[in-house]
Image (cartoon, grey):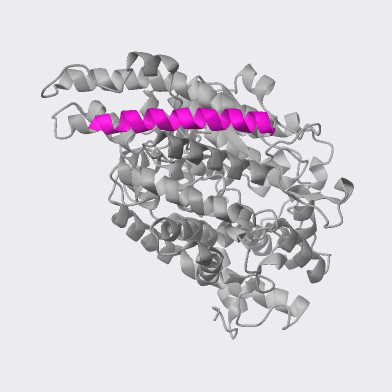
Amino acid sequence: MRPLLLLLALAACKKDGGTSRPAGGGEPTPAEAQAFVKQVDTDLRQVWYEEELAAWKHATDITDANEAALATKSADTMAYLSETIPKTSRFDGLEVDFDTRRQLDRLKLAAGLPAPNDPTKRERLAEVSSKLSGMYGKGEWCPPEGGEDACLDLGELEAIIGDTSKSPADRQLAWERWRTVSVPMAPLYAEFVELGNEGARELGFADMGALWRSTYDMEPDAFATEIDRLYAQVEPLYEQLHCHVRAELNAKYGDEVVPPGGPLPAHLTGNMWAQNWDLLYNDLAPYPDQPSLDVTAKLADWDAVKMTKAAESFFVSLGLDPLPETFWERSLLEDPGDRDVECHASAWDIGMRDDLRIKMCIKPDADSLYTLHHELGHNYYYHYYHTLPTLYQAGANDGFHEAIGDAVMLSITPGYLKQIGLLDEVSDSKEALINKQFQNALGAIAFLPFGRMIDQWRWDVFDGSVPPEQYNAHWWELREKFQGVAPPAPRPADAFDPGAKYHIPGNTPYMRYFLAQVLQYQFHRAMCESAGHTGPLHTCSIYGNEAAGERLKAMLAMGASKPWPDALEAGAGTRQMDASALVAYYGPLMDWLKEKNAGRECGWE
């Protein structure tokens, strides 16, 4: 994990001036720029270690003391960035070699959470940021009459939402209870936006959203246009899936619960945030008489280590390195039960030292198995670029990082699952194919508009278009516009539903996940070509193919050392992000959905 509060200032840097003033006076020279970048690289490698170690301690043991320690480190980080980043302007216009210029440019964009120069405001931003993250991590619903035994945490409330046998009323209650956790976040988030925007403006950006969009090797407005183009490619497939799922839920629950022609009720999708609809599959399987694709029952006696090793074995089969022993010693694979931990899965490389870890409360189910492949994709990216300069230790763009593990998951075909003993039988019939694609689409395709709208909401908040009193209303306007999803009942005046999603209080940009959904299919198509696959894309598995692995490793090793089109060309053979591979992959499903939806009124008012 690369926390957005990037880097921690060393005491030595402050004492000696460190990188805060480039050597020499007068007009700068290329040699001075190179020395500046080299010093930054030295400082940040150590800085990252200390900052990420504090973040790890907080995430794996949420206490007031660890929260305060992280806030202190974050304030130091912000101070360092505030002092160091402006120094890059001294080299603006100076003709230097490619690597020096690229690292200078990347340093300008390093402050994912930019802090004001004012020390008091900077410390307050760090405090607010840590508090928001801690509120989410410790969040639980407790009855008004008290009694800790009756409290329900996120996992327990998610279990109710995901149990499609429960009544809509019970699931609505669980949905609403989780959103009480985020109500106290609202004033803190408004303060967070104000302080972060002040820091962004001091760095020369219009607001935090403009800073985030500037990290993609293109102008901020051009990136927004690119997102619109990509979403237009996938929107027809989502609309067909939405139409069919709504019709099926309407048949089950009736017009009063699921209005025909209207948005889907968020609490009936099987997911706390309606970001995927995977858990609807058993109820909505197109051809239930086909062999089951659910591997959860087979995983019942698998422990967390066995599941993680199964995910590792896929990467190793491609010729990639085994995970280091320290990974197994230092990772958090299960909820320890004796302390509060942040169970939201994440991958880490503490201090860019190949100190690979994951933090996850693994359960013996299919969702955890797939999540493990996703997280190890991050770890392998960290591993293959960890020798690069500090400012290159990132994905070519952040969508790349999220796409690696998911591209591998596209090769987890029914045949592969049978091979490793998780399915007893598989079928190559058209009906079995539609089942598999429909199951995949309930996760991947259902997610697309959600991934698209999260940062749109933040961009609108950051640029001042949406004031605090309209935060929640705008959230649901965008969710209905893009997803066709609505809350189960009118929301209270004090609701702050965005805060009920981890990435909002955690200040993690989200467009990366949308981009990953596009990129993973591009990577999959290219690796299948390297593997010599012929035939439809959805039939390809690269398991055990080292030629595909070589192509993957070549892209991973580039990190962010080149603009992302260069890395995309290495990994996918093209310089443009393009959803055509995704659309082609789901071609059979699209045809089937159009047949099922014939005569139905699709879309939503």
Q: Is residue 413 above or below residue 221?
A: above
Q: Is residue 572 left or right of residue 249?
A: left
Q: How many marks?
A: 0
Q: Is residue 300 left or right of residue 27?
A: right
* Residue extending furthest toward the front: 120
Q: Residue at x 41, y 39 (%)?
A: 115
Task: Residue 257: give x, y in percent of width and height.
Answer: 73, 78
Q: Quadrant of residue 41?
A: top left
Q: Residue at x 70, y 58 (%)?
A: 180
Foreground: 313 or 414?
313
Q: Is residue 83 magenta?
A: yes
Question: Where the C terminus falls, by quadrant?
Answer: bottom right
Foreground: 318 or 431?
318
Task: Residue 106: give x, y in percent of width and height.
Answer: 32, 35
* Residue extending furthest toward the left: 27
Q: Residue at x 73, y 50 (%)?
A: 154
Q: Is residue 381 above or below residue 425?
A: above
User: Which residues are drawn in magenta?
Assistant: 62-88
Task: Residue 175: give x, y in percent of width and height.
Answer: 72, 62
Q: Main secondary structure of the magenta part?
A: helix
Q: Is residue 368 magenta?
A: no
Q: Quadrant of residue 15?
A: top left
Foreground: 586 or 211?
211
Residue 569 visible in the current orientation: yes
Residue 393 visible in the current orientation: no
Q: Quadrant of residue 543?
A: top right
Task: Residue 450: give x, y in percent of width and height.
Answer: 54, 60
